[in-house]
Image (cartoon, rainbow, N blue to C red):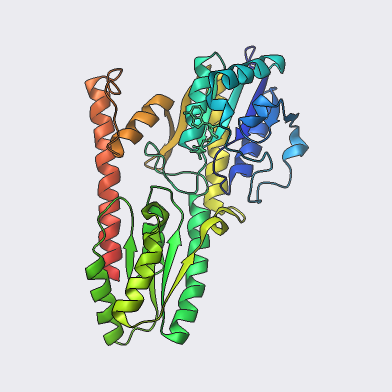
Amino acid sequence: MNTKFRKIGVLTSGGDAPGMNACVRAVTRTALAHGIEVVGILGGYSGLLNNNMKPLGHNDVSNIVNRGSTFLYSDRCLEFKTEEGMQKAVQCCKDNGIDGIVCIGGDGTFRGATDLSNRGIPTIGLTGSIDNDITASDYTIGFDTAMNTVCEMIDRLRDTCESHARCNVVEVMGRDCGEIALRTGIACGAVAVAIPELPFDEAAAIAKIKELKAGGKRNMIVIVSEGLGKYSEELAKKIDAETGIETKFARLAHVVRGGNPTLRDRLTAAEMGTMAVKLMLEGKSNLVVVERNGELVSCDINYSHIVDRMYKNKLKEGDLDPYSEEEIASMKELCAYRKSEIERLYKIAADLA
Ligand code: ADP
C-alpha cells in the first residue's frame, strides 16, 4: 500500500458534463482497490470552503455510471479564487486528512487545481466539459453525449421544418469553442455553420439557402455556436427577411448538458479516472490527463493553460519563458493541428451543405 496517500478527495467543478458521475465512480473504485480512502467534496471548490464532503465507499458510487448530472454537484465558487479562500481550502484539506484531490472540470477548474498544488495539496485534473474546449486534449468527457443530444434535437427540428418548408437557426453551446456546432453541423446536414474560430460568410450562406430553396429543398438547418453571442438571433431575422423562408430560432442551451452519458463518455471517464489515481500514487501532481491520438497521456496543467492561450492568441509576456524550444515547437504544432482540423471539418460541412 502506498504510504503517502491514505485519503484522496474528488470533486466536480465548473460547467457540468454527462460522464462526470462515471468518472467519480472510477476514481473512487480505483482508489479503494489500492487501499486508499476517498471523500467526495460537494459543490466543487465551495465544498472545501464549507467543509462539505462525505466519505465514498464502494456502494456510494453504485448506480451512477449511467447517470447524467454530477451527484457531487458543481458550483462556480468565486471565493476560492481569493488568497483567503485558498488558505481556507488548504486548511480544510489538512483538517480532513486529504492527501490529494482529483479535480474534474474545465480550464477554470484546473487553475484552481494548480493553486492548490502550489500550496502543497497534490492535484490531478481530468477534462470534464461538454465543449471539447481543452486545447491540450483531443477529447473532453461529456462532448460525445452533448453532440448526440444536439443531433437528436436538430433531427426533430428538421422534421417540422420539412413539413412547413421552414428554416431553423439553432444556437448550440460551446462557450468560445465551435466544436459542438461544427461536428453536429456535419452530422445533421446543416446548410450553414457559424463558429467563433473562422469568419462566417453570411452573404454566401444566404445565397446558398436561396439556391437550395430554388432546387426544391424544404428544410434548412443553420447552426450557430454560442461563442458568437446574439448573432444567432440576428441571423435568423436576416434569413427570414432576405430569403422569404419563414425562419425560426432555437437556443438549445442547457438541455445539452443533461442526459445519460454515451458509451464513449463512460469509457473515457473510466479510463481517465483510473489514470488519475495511478498518477497520484506515483507521486505526481499538477497534471491533467488528456487524450492525444487515441491514447491517454498526462501533461503539466501549466502547459495546458499556456497552449490554450497560444491557440487563442492570448499569450502574455513571459508565458513561454519556462519552456524549452522543443516544448514551444510542440505547442505550436498542436495549435496548428487544432486549427487545421477545424478548417478541414468546416470545409466538409460546407461541401456537404
Ligand atoms: P470550468 O472548470 O468549466 O472552466 P469555471 O471557469 O467556472 O469552469 O471554473 C470552475 C471553478 O474553478 C471556479 O468557480 C473557481 O472556483 C475555480 N477557478 C476558476 N478560475 C480560477 C483561478 N484563476 N484561480 C483559482 N480558481 C479558479
**Residue 306, percent from left and from top:** 34, 29
Q: Is residue 345 visible?
A: yes
Residue under the point 27% across and 18% down:
321
Residue under the point 72% across and 40% down:
61
Question: With 48 as the anchor, is 124 left or right in this view?
Answer: left
Name the residue nearer the viewer: 332 or 163: 163
**Residue 116, percent from left and from top:** 54, 20
Residue 226 in which image quadrant: bottom left
Name the residue nearer the viewer: 265 or 75: 75
Question: With 201 as the anchor, is 134 left or right in this view?
Answer: right
Residue under the point 49% across and 74% down:
157
**Residue 300, percent from left and from top:** 41, 25
Tell me: residue 320, above or below residue 25: above
Name the residue nearer the viewer: 285 or 251: 251
Tell me: residue 104, above or below residue 133: above
Residue 14 in which image quadrant: top right
Residue under the point 39% across and 54% down:
229
Which quadrant holds the N terminus? Answer: top right
